[in-house]
Image: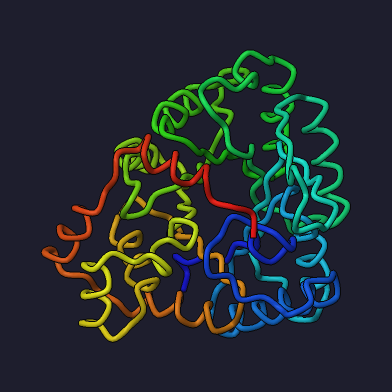
Amino acid sequence: MERIAVGLAALGRPAYINLGRELPGTRDVPAMRAATHEVLDAAYAAGVRWVDVARSYGLAEDFLASWLAEPGHTDVTVSSKWGYRYVGEWRLDAPVHEVKEHSAARFAEQWAETRALLGEQVNLYQVHSLTVDSPLFSDAALIEALAALSDQGVEVGFSTSGPAQADAVRRAFELEAAGRPVFAAVQSTWNVLEPSVGAALAEARAAGKRVLVKETLANGRLVVEAPEVLRRIAAAHGVGTDAVAVAAVLANEWVSAALVGPSSTGQLASNLAAAGVSLTADEVAELAGLAEAPEEYWRHRSHLGWD
């Protein structure tokens, strides 16, 4: 399971834009903490050793910190993200769930919060949803602060979203501070519906960067609204459509790790079945035919409701 990581976006807060979540009947903090710990226990038992969180994932960092404090979890790699702040106040009907700000002040504030919860176990800290028009690219103080983080032994990365992900990836990896690259890792959306960033990620991996892939199930669309070809291939392999979708990600040699975001141990087990799926070249080609125009994919995503 070394190429599969677990993300806590669907478990750290009561509402998220993910179809098909399986959550406790009561989504209060104790119930969500317990559900998070159950998933993490099952993932660890299955051999998963990477967990990804973010400051905007509600209490995900807090839930992870309490789990890491239990005996036997010192070999877990942890990545987190800064740049969004959770403002949903634990409400399903919050008008706004998170707000974005890429500034030196926000970085300093959120890095201190992450460090207070997760201490020395943070291995990778990422700018959350970096886009080509982010003010980060012209903020010398922020760029220097990010570069300094690597001097503390923490890998510095960024995540991307939107139809121009490839442009953001290439521009970000050009950033330097004192003659050294600022970023060592990227986390981008890639799935069989939205593979447009693939070439840029392959370039990054060839240059020695760490490449993480998120939204492998297209926010649940590839399970709840699975296309017929995906269902057929899944049936042939005796697994769920989620496992095939994740296997399609792992079929790319440039992927360091694929993130799955289960909200229950059942979903986790189904996701992890991907490790046993070896897609044929013909199946990979069939799945490639599911790709949507990036603009259409992200337009559809923007209309998903916070459940």
Relative placement, left or right, of 141 versus 177 is right
Relative placement, left or right, of 290 versus 28 is left
In the rendered image, residue 137, in percent from the top left (x then y), is placed at 59, 18
- Look at the image and name its color scheme: rainbow
Is the residue 303 above or below the residue 167 in the image? below
Q: Quadrant of residue 152?
A: top right
Is the residue 75 above or below the residue 149 in the image? below
Q: Please report the residue visible at 75 percent of the width from the left and 24 percent of the height from the top.
A: 103
Q: Nearer the viewer, residue 71 or 11?
A: 11
Q: Nearer the viewer, residue 90 or 136?
A: 90
Is the residue 261 above or below the residue 103 in the image? below
Q: How many marks?
A: 0
Q: Nearer the viewer, residue 258 or 220?
A: 220
In the rendered image, residue 107, in percent from the top left (x then y), is placed at 77, 33
Q: Nearer the viewer, residue 225 or 160?
A: 225
Is the residue 207 above or below the residue 135 in the image? below
Q: Please report the residue visible at 36 percent of the width from the left and 54 percent of the height from the top.
A: 191
Relative placement, left or right, of 272 versus 285 is right
Q: Please report the residue visible at 78 percent of the width from the left and 46 percent of the height from the top.
A: 86
Q: Quadrant of residue 26?
A: bottom right
Q: Please report the residue visible at 20 percent of the width from the left and 82 percent of the height from the top.
A: 236
In the rendered image, residue 104, in percent from the top left (x then y), is placed at 77, 25
Q: Quadrant of residue 272?
A: bottom left
| Quadrant of image for the C terminus | bottom right
